[in-house]
Amino acid sequence: DIQMTQSPSSLSASVGDTVTITCRASQGISNYLAWYQQKPGKVPKLLIYVSSTLQSGVPSRFSGSGSGTDFTLTISSLQPEDVATYYCQKYDSAPLTFGGGTKVEIK
Amino acid sequence: EVQLVESGGGLIQPGGSLRISCAASGFTVNRNYMNWVRQAPGKGLEWLSIIYTGGNTNYADSVKGRFTISRDNSKNTVYLQMNSLRAEDTAVYYCARQDVEAARYDMDVWGQGTTVTVSS
């Protein structure tokens, strides 16, 4: 099975900073990669699909890129409401594995 | 409104069985892929199972042989039958849709979750 590895596992940044989270697949998954945001105590929310397409209603400071095995989620100009854990997920075929998550905090 | 509502969680003893439900509204479950995902306390998301439009199913190794996903088209509801429950199955269980009708396969709609606690 394909493994999904996220890094870092946590980060702390200042409001206004640009934050980058990486996700690596152990084998190529084309662009079948989604990013989810989960705020404390809340349900996961889809941010980005097919690696780089922003879900409707998601602020444009979020962006995604990558294909094959290496992907990134970028938050430009970090805001206090972006405090959350972010997960990548492959969905090319089952098992639809999630990455381990990246916890984003404000410094 | 497109919505998923899980129910049926609770406290169950180790070795016991439980069936949780996911009722859909605003779309048809058998025209989409439906999934179960869980999150143990303080842990990340773990994909568990999928039921495809044709009725085929697939499972994570951690639950294969113990959990069974199914659906009732007349009730527009998806189920997860969980047998031989262990303490490590304690988690919030979410159902999530993959929107096949829109040719999208990300999980765009999630339920609010139902909590399963396995403890004596």
Image: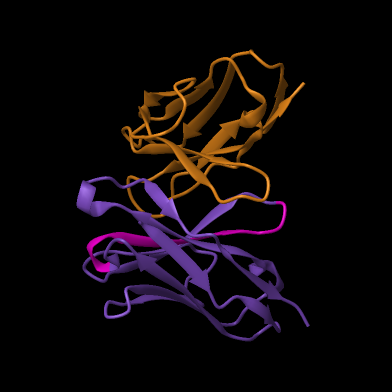
Chain colours: A orange, B purple
Extent of the magenta region: B30-42
Measured as percent of width and height from the top left, residue B24 is found at 37, 67
| Corner quadrant of residue A29 | top left
**Location of residue A36 with respect to B71 vertically, above or below:** above
Q: Quadrant of the C terminus of chain A?
A: top right
Measured as percent of width and height from the top left, residue A87 is found at 54, 39
| In magenta segment, residue B33 | yes
Which one is nearer the viewer's eye here, A103 or A46?
A: A46
**Location of residue B67 with respect to B41 vertically, above or below:** below
Which one is nearer the viewer's eye here, B62 or A60?
A: A60
Would residue B74 be found to the left or right of residue A98 on screen? Answer: left
Q: Residue furthest front?
A: B1
| Corner quadrant of residue B57 | bottom left
**Location of residue B16 with respect to A16 vertically, above or below:** below
Residue depicted at x 50% and y 69% = B6
Residue depicted at x 43% and y 75% = B79
Would residue B91 be found to the left or right of residue A3 on screen? Answer: right
Residue depicted at x 54% and y 41% = A99
Which one is nearer the viewer's eye here, A48 or A15?
A: A15
Residue depicted at x 47% and y 49% = A97
Measured as percent of width and height from the top left, residue A91 is found at 37, 46
Measured as percent of width and height from the top left, residue A37 is found at 55, 39
Would residue A59 be found to the left or right of residue B97 on screen? Answer: right
**Location of residue B109 with respect to B87 vertically, above or below:** above
| Corner quadrant of residue A92 | top left
| In magenta segment, residue A89 | no
